[in-house]
Structures are given as C-alpha cells and as structure tokens.
Amino acid sequence: MGDFVRLADVAGPPTELLFGDWYPALRASELRVGKMTTATLLGIPVLLGRRSDGRVFAMRDLCPHRGIPLSAGWFDGETVQCKYHGWRFEPCGGQCVEIPSLTAEQREGLDPTKIYAAAFPCEERDGYAWVYVPAAGAGRVVSNLPVVPELPKFSARYKSAHLVAELPCNVDHGIIGLMDPAHGPFVHQAWWWRSKASIHEKTKHFEPLEDRENNGRNAGFRMSAHAPSGNSAPYKLLGVYGEPITTTIDFVLPNRRLETIRCGAKWFSSLTTITPVTASTCRIDVVAAWNVFYWVPFVTSIATFFGARFVRQDQETMIEQAQGLRSNPSLMLIDDADKPAKWYFALKQARLKGTGEHPLSGPVVLRWRS
Ligand code: FES
Ligand SMILES: [Fe+2]
C-alpha cells in the first residue's frame, strides 16, 4: 500500500497554514546548474534551481507578465527566461533584466529592472533547499528572517541519512502523529523496536520553549533531557558504551521535531519536519546524523532501511486514517498522551492570531503508557 495511492484522491480536509517561515522544499542534490526543478510548498508552485556560482534559488513558478509557469521556459545558469515573451529574470532576487519586445526608446520609459518576479529566500542546510515562504502580499522579503533550521552536530566526523514520505493528511495530522506517544507500540511494532507487550507507564517532563523576541513565532516545548525508554532496542544498543544516555526532544513551530541523544562523546540527532504541500496534504522529511557505530560498514544503509520502515508504518496508517477523515468527523484529544497535540494546536492558534501566548506556564509532568 502507499506507492500506488494518489494522495490527492485520498486526502482529508484542509487546514490553515503558517506562512512566514522556512520549509524544506526538496533535496539540494536535485538542483543542478542549468536545470529547473519544481515543488509545491503551502499550495504555492515553486521553481527551484542552482546558479552557475553554486547558489540555490526559489521563485514563485509564475511569470509576472501573463502568468505562465516560469518552469516552462529556460535557465542558462544565470537567468530564467520565460517561454512566452522571453522576459529574463535574475533568479535569486527575481529582478527582471530584459524585456525583448521593448525598443530602445520604449526602454527609456519602462525600465525592466523595476519589475520583479516573486523570489523567495532559499538556503542550503543539511542537504535540503530550505525556502522561506512569505505570507501573501508580504512583498519582497529580504530582512529580519528567522534563522534557517539546522540539525545540530556535536563532532567533526559523523554519518548522516535522510528519508522522505508523502502523507495524505493535512499538516496538523502529520504533526500530531509525530508527537503522539501512544501509537508507538501499535504502529511501530517490530522485534527490533518494541512490542505491544512491552507497554509500560512512563513519566515525562516537559518545559515551554518560548520565542519572546519574535512573539512566539518559533515557540514550542521540550521533553526535558531524560534517560530514554528502556523498551526501545536502538537505545539499548547505546548501552554498550556504558555511559549515561540522555535524550531531549523539542517541538517548535511551525513544524519541527528535533531529537538529540547523547551518550558521553557519542551522539545521535534527528530533525523531522512536516511540510504542508497543500492545505490538505503534507510531506515528512527526516534527516539524521550520528557518530555512533561510525565503524560499522553500511551503517548508513542499515539506518536508512530501518528508518524507512518506520516512516512507512506511519504513512500507511495515515493513508488509512485519511479515508475516515474525508467525512470530516469530530475527533478527540484525551489526557496526557494527547496533551502535546493540544499544545501544538494552542501554539498554532497563538501564532495565527499573533497573541504570543504559550499554553505552558512552566514545567509540566505527563504520564502515559506506551
Ligand atoms: S508571460 Fe512571461 S514573458 Fe510574457
Ligand atoms: Fe510514528
């Protein structure tokens, strides 16, 4: 299941989206000089590419003259040229540099360089092309941008891997699925991970992550540093190092889960993002880095294999869930296991309304069985 399902055909209801932030569009390795690639972010068609100087760029895939997608035209490594009337644009800022139909005299009255196609800030981090998606009507965005998200690394040498899967649900279901502890023993059963029989009571400490300088734009919450769950095999593996293991999991708006596991000088970190493709579909991207078991041959392939299986289990579950969500049922969030989901919805509303309010006034203890 999964590969042959067209997400648009099974997608559930839409949701409101958080504009004005960075989202990963695609793997930067897909961007080659002289080639144009397209992606959809928050319902916006985006054209991406790489200039001959190596810099990546993202533009709205739409010619400001008469609306044809710019991706239908040409890119020579320096400028993007529209297929329809040949206007040329500098892709990093969107500035028009040529309108071929203008006579020399006309060019005196109409300066092409005063015209801009919409270009979005675009940066390469951890192998992704991150795109800043502004709010509609925000104009040209150049200053006061939030920091580009990045996976923390704690040593010079490390290995890394990434995974991607499309999800047929809106970003809210993707995100609350990400932070939901109670599905683990059911969806992710496997001998190497955990089984239903291993369910036991857990106590987790949370604290608010405020982003006061930015009125809560990237606010979130942290599952405070703790010894990881004893019923997860990968954590048991780290036990061979004989040092205390701690894990910290942060969620920050709009869509990021960051997990860091430290065991002496050994570390593992992962950044998972749920990116709205449209208002009713999303994509999960996971990038991980580690210096654990550095010496094991094929460690990256092994990690990717198990990680892909894990993500596929979530994806298959969400494809099934989407069938139910299509009839827009009312849903329940119960008790402590669903509390992080409630916090997410409260943080999202606070950001949409600009209130800067945080649902946690201080540290909180949650208990559940998983
Ligand atoms: S529509 Fe692009 S140049 Fe006319
Ligand atoms: Fe999951």
Image: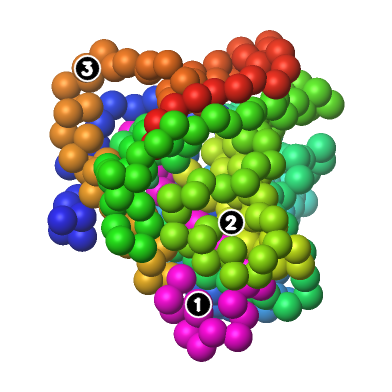
- Residue at 62 percent of width and 14 percent of height: 359
Q: Which mark is residue 270?
A: 2
* Measured Cα–Cα span from mark 3 to mark 1: 41 Å
Indicate whether 255 appears above or below 356: below
Is residue 292 found inside the magenta-colored segment of the image? Answer: yes
Mark 3 residue type:
Pro
Q: Earlier in the sequence, mark 3 or mark 1?
A: 1
Query: In what quadrant of the picture does the C terminus appear?
Result: top left
Q: Is residue 218 left or right of residue 318?
A: right
Between 17 and 178, the one lying in front of the other is 178
Residue carrying label 3 = 329
Mark 2 or 3, which is nearer the eye? 2
Residue carrying label 1 = 300
Residue 319, can we see it?
A: yes
Where does the magenta region start and end? 277-303
Mark 3 or 1, which is nearer the eye? 1
The residue sitting at the bottom extreme is 297
Mark 2 residue type:
Ser
Q: Callout 2: 10 Å neighbours few (<14), some, many (20+)?
A: many
Q: Position of residue 42 (x, y in %)?
A: 47, 39
Indicate whether 157 appears above or below 220: below
Between 6 and 152, the one lying in front of the other is 152
Q: Earlier in the sequence, mark 2 or mark 3?
A: 2
The secondary element bearing badge 2 is classed as strand
Q: Earlier in the sequence, mark 2 or mark 1?
A: 2
Q: Position of residue 9 (x, y in %)?
A: 17, 42
- Residue at 70 percent of width and 21 percent of height: 363
